[in-house]
Image: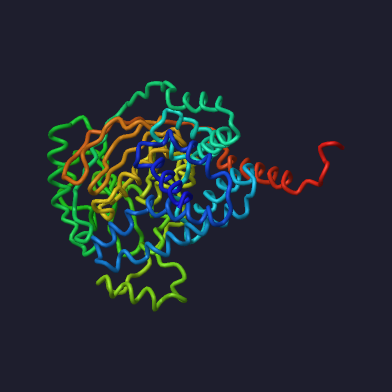
Amino acid sequence: MRAFLLGLLLALTLPPFPLGFLAPFVLAFLLKGGFREGFFAGLGFWGLHLVWLPQSFAQNFGPWGAVPFLPLVLVKALSFGLLFALTPNAPMRIGGWVLLEWLTEQGELAFPWGFLGYALVEAPGRILAAWGGVYLLSLLVLFVAWGLWARRPWVLLPWAFLWLLPLPEARPQAQALLVQGNINPLRKFQGELDEAVYLRLTAAGLRAHPEADLVVWPETAVWAIPKGVDALLQGRPLLTGLNLLGPNRAVLYREGEILGHYDKTRLVPFGERFPFREALGGVYAFFFRAMGLGDLADRTPGEKVAPIGPYGVLICYESVFPSVARGLAREGARVLVLLTNDAWFGPSFGGRQHFALGRLRAVETGRWLLRAGNDGITASIDPFGRVVAEIPPHQEGFLLAPYALRTGLTPYARLGDFPVGLALTIFLLGLILRVRPPGWRNR
């Protein structure tokens, strides 16, 4: 019961909850204990951290939509149990925890949620992500927890500094018009994209803000570039998502011509693609029928992460993958543009959680991030992770969003996930301490 409650408390230190400063205090109690403690802590943590899954799926697809939540939480709790069982001392647990986070970003079942580094997303100290990404922030949180566990209260001084650090000013040089259509996700799924909404809002937005030099529509906003849009744009480029039958695509359009496109490379498991379909075809068919979806086909993933001109496009789920944003920056993107449709989250806190996780991509790459969501959160985020402009979610609207085109690479963009290598080193040092022969200190 104690471990379960600690897991719940740990979930409250990650977005969208505002208790990130308490993360090391909770983790200090989780640096010891075996499989049982890890499993029950995982049940509490993942059960609360991902509670938006049954909320959103049940609202959109009925009671059967909530069923997959239970096995997911059990599997994630089992991963915590195994982590705790295989890491009997603090160095092994610290290194092993970050290694486990990195592993969840890899492979067919990649689901990179729940990283400890996101406890710092509301702290100015998040700018350290420019040096080592979210994995460096996770190591920092764990090291402070280790200091508290070892009764070294002085570690609270650097921890407090991360929350009080002054940030430099970020100066925008341009402004984009971000359009929020607020179209029901099931209508979008059934093909009723209602392009008239985007034309109407774009016309109103450009009348109010003629200084906008770029227009952005969200993920899967329209089937094709609508007629009459050139008269509205008056030479401005349009960056929009297309709802194609195959790839989830973003295109850059200007004056009657598509200048380039980007296809989503990281597809949502069990949403846009269905892993192990040959073996689990009957299971998928049962749930598809129960949720009234028919026989869903896998989307086609893109082959390469590459910008469209100066714009590094992220499509929805990709915003939680540090490697995707880093790849765009390395390929020459000068501003990040996130096209998303978070209406699937429904009334849950999932949309705000997704928003918070994506903010770190701006810091890691040293780029402005323009975020256009179907129902929000539509916002502009500066390279230090600050939200500088935002409109309320769950309503039609448009936002004049400041941004700048930036060059150069942050240390993280150049060096990649080196904190994962550091975590492996810490784990191996802990293993050496664990298996050292008796009396080795006296030799």
State the quadrant of the C terminus: top right
- Between residue 438 and residue 23, name the one nearer to us: 438
Left or right, 91 with respect to 307, comes to right
- Between residue 309 and residue 400, name the one nearer to us: 400
x 37%, y 21%: residue = 169
The extreme bottom residue here reads 282
What colour scheme was applied to this rendering of the protein? rainbow
The extreme front residue here reads 1
Left or right, 220 with respect to 434, comes to left
Residue 408 screen position, x and y as percent: 48, 31
x 30%, y 35%: residue = 380
- Between residue 404 and residue 71, name the one nearer to us: 71
Q: How many marks?
A: 0
Residue 208 screen position, x and y as percent: 13, 32
- Between residue 54 and residue 385, name the one nearer to us: 54
Residue 123 screen position, x and y as percent: 41, 30
Query: Eyeballing the image, is 183 above or below 147?
Result: below
Residue 282 screen position, x and y as percent: 39, 78
